[in-house]
Structure formats: C-alpha cells, structure tokens
Amino acid sequence: MSLLARVIEEPGDAVSVAAVEGEIDASNVQEVGARLRALMTNQSTALIVDLTDTRYLDSAGINMLFELSGELTDRQQRLQLVVPSATPIQRMLTIAGLVGTIPTHETRAAAIAQHA
C-alpha cells in the first residue's frame, strides 16, 4: 500500500468494512479503489468505508467513491460511508454532492447497525 494511505480491511460474509487512514489522492486512488473493490464478493450486500482517519481526499478520491457506489448499485450492493461531521472530509464530500447521495454515518457502529 502507498505510504500516503493504509486500508485496514475487515471482510465479512454480507458486510465488509474498510478503514482508510491517511490521504487519498491521484497518486494512490487506483490502489485504494482496488483494495475496496476486492472486499466485495457475490454474497456481499454492503461495503462500509470508514473515513474517520482519512486526513485528505482530493477529487480523484471523491470520483473513486462515486464510481464505486455506482458499481455496487449495479450489482445490487450498497456503499456506506463513515464520516464524522464538522471534519474537512465531511465538508469536501458535502460540497461534491456525495453526502446525500451515498448513505453517510457518524460512526462505524451506526453504519453496521443498519445491517443488524
């Protein structure tokens, strides 16, 4: 994995969780996206991407999340994000129109509770 970002994977039968620590930008977006996509199987119903410890996200990262959401929707799967409010990442995602398009939760526990 890139020195800029670390993806911590928690594969699950129906729901997988991936926490992204660090920065997602044009230099590592392909690698991060590939790691997220690899967590999904035909039995998966959802992928939760926890951006709590993501310090930076540029337009390439935002586009990757939009694309990933579309791909999962086409497969009748869902993408959910964990983005604490009042953070720079939350503001960026709101401006880009991602918040409101993709289900977003304050905490990982809240996102996981949607699938209990």
Image (tube, rainbow, N blue to C red):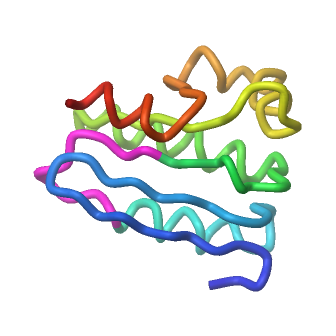
Percent x, y of residue 87: 84, 35
Percent x, y of residue 20: 62, 61
User: What's the residue at 67%, 47% (across, down)?
Assistant: 52
Percent x, y of residue 85: 75, 26
* Quadrant position of the N terminus in the picture: bottom right
Residue nearest the viewer, comparing 34 with 53:
53
Please name the predominant secondary structure of the magenta segment in the image. loop
User: What's the residue at 79%, 76% (across, down)?
Assistant: 4
Residue nearest the viewer, comparing 104 with 73:
104
Position of 116 with respect to 102 (left or right) is left
From this viewpoint, which residue is outermost toward the top?
100
User: What's the residue at 21%, 40% (across, down)?
Assistant: 45
User: What's the residue at 85%, 54% (across, down)?
Assistant: 56
Q: What span is colored magenta in the figure?
A: 39-48
Q: Is residue 40 magenta?
A: yes
Position of 110 with respect to 26 (left or right) is left
